[in-house]
Amino acid sequence: MVIEGELRRPDNSIFWVTTWFKTERNDSGEISRLIGVNQDITERKEMEIALARSEQEYRSLANSITDIFFAMDENLRYIFWNQASEKFTGISAENALGKTIYEIFQGKDAEKAADIYREVLQSKVPRTFENVFHSNGKEYHFEISVYPSGSGISVFTKDVTERKEMEKKLRDSTKKLLLLTQINRHDIFNELTAMHFMHDLALDTSDLEEIYSHIRNSKEELRRIERVLQFTREYDNFASSQSMWLMLRQIIDSIQGEVAAGDILFENDVSEDIEVFADALIQKVFKALFENAIRHGQTLTKVWFYTRECGGSLIISCEDDGIGIPDFEKEAIFTYGHGKHTGIGLFLAREMLSINSLTICESGVETKGSKFEIHVPEEKWRYRRSHSDTLTDPGRKEHTGE
């Protein structure tokens, strides 16, 4: 028989021993003699106690950090799972330990992480990489540091989703600054071109009434330039602005005063109750579509805007009765420099929409008119219920008919 225990020395100090016992029995089978051998194991026992204390401190530390931390063995099975891991995944340590990465996470994101984990297991060289995981319908970006640890690995995972969102906002702001500069240059250049033309006509005639007519038209071009500059002034802080709920019909109506349409009929059949979650620059998109129809429609007599629902999304259409666009040009018209004029209008329109996660295409029939369709995702539009709803979170899906 072998037992371990504490013994006390004469000076009251404690030491640990392992004792082996052996018994001897007499002819009657009774124990007649007990032989024992003690081995001092104090040093080993103190090391075991220190190791257990160290492991407990390690677990307490790992559980106290706010970043996700876990450890895996050589088979990529979880052997440690801290409280931050539990909070993010909703999976307790009890249910995670012993499982592989594929039993916790699925898809290509898990496969990418597993490949790097295996690489660190083989090379014994630490690695840091970024990866994306999806949980509860949300996309998370992580900076993951992997370290070899014994026969397995230790993994520290920092949530950098907020940083990534800020980086995207910065890129979008820079892009919007560039777009606004291009838009204003494009609009003002067009108006100045028209003014030069009016002045040339005025200089080529001696008819005072005709001269006055050209001056009046030129003055209207100046007013449109003033409106462009006014928009710029009102949008001084647009680079840091947030998207907001905009009343779609009102936005489309506002372009009538900015475009010289002549006798062309303008119709806006968009419901007054529809709102889109976008940047104020979207107004320039509808203006570009209206101008494009006037400039290229040739036989044009009418331009109209309307909407329809499609699988939860909203389709905003701008249609005209002009000559239409050939099939081979339906995509080319959105490229920079394409067309008979500057080619900037539709290119900028697509760029502005992309910033707001919207898309545009042309789906009209040649000889029967052009039709531009703007696709608004389900979470980017709604039916307005009351004035206070303009501050509602964009995620609320009011238009589904529920």
Image (tube, helix red, strand yellow):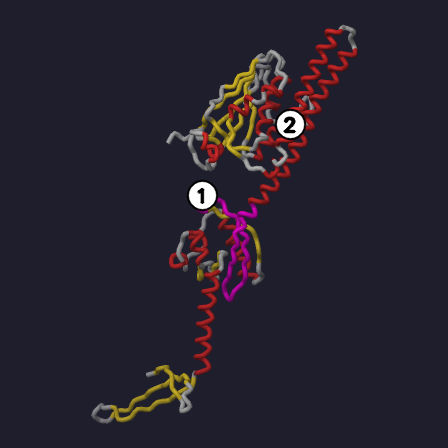
Q: Of 385 and 395, which appears nearest the observer? A: 385
User: How far across and down, in percent of the image, does residue 213 sit?
Assistant: 70, 10
Residue beneath disc 1: 137
Q: Of 282 and 109, which appears nearest the observer? A: 282
If the image is split into quadrants, where does the N terminus sit?
bottom left
Horizontal side of 205 relative to 288 (left or right) equals right
User: How far across and down, in percent of the image, does residue 259 sit?
Assistant: 62, 19
Q: Which residues are magenta?
A: 135-164
Label 2 sits on what residue type?
Gln
Horizontal side of 44 relative to 180 (left or right) equals left
- The answer to which quarter of the image holds residue 144 is bottom right
Q: CA distance from mark 2 to mark 1?
A: 41 Å
Magenta span contains residue 143: yes
Magenta span contains residue 96: no
Q: Tell me which residue sits at (43%, 45%) in the image.
A: 136
- The answer to which quarter of the image holds residue 350 is top right
Residue beneath disc 2: 230
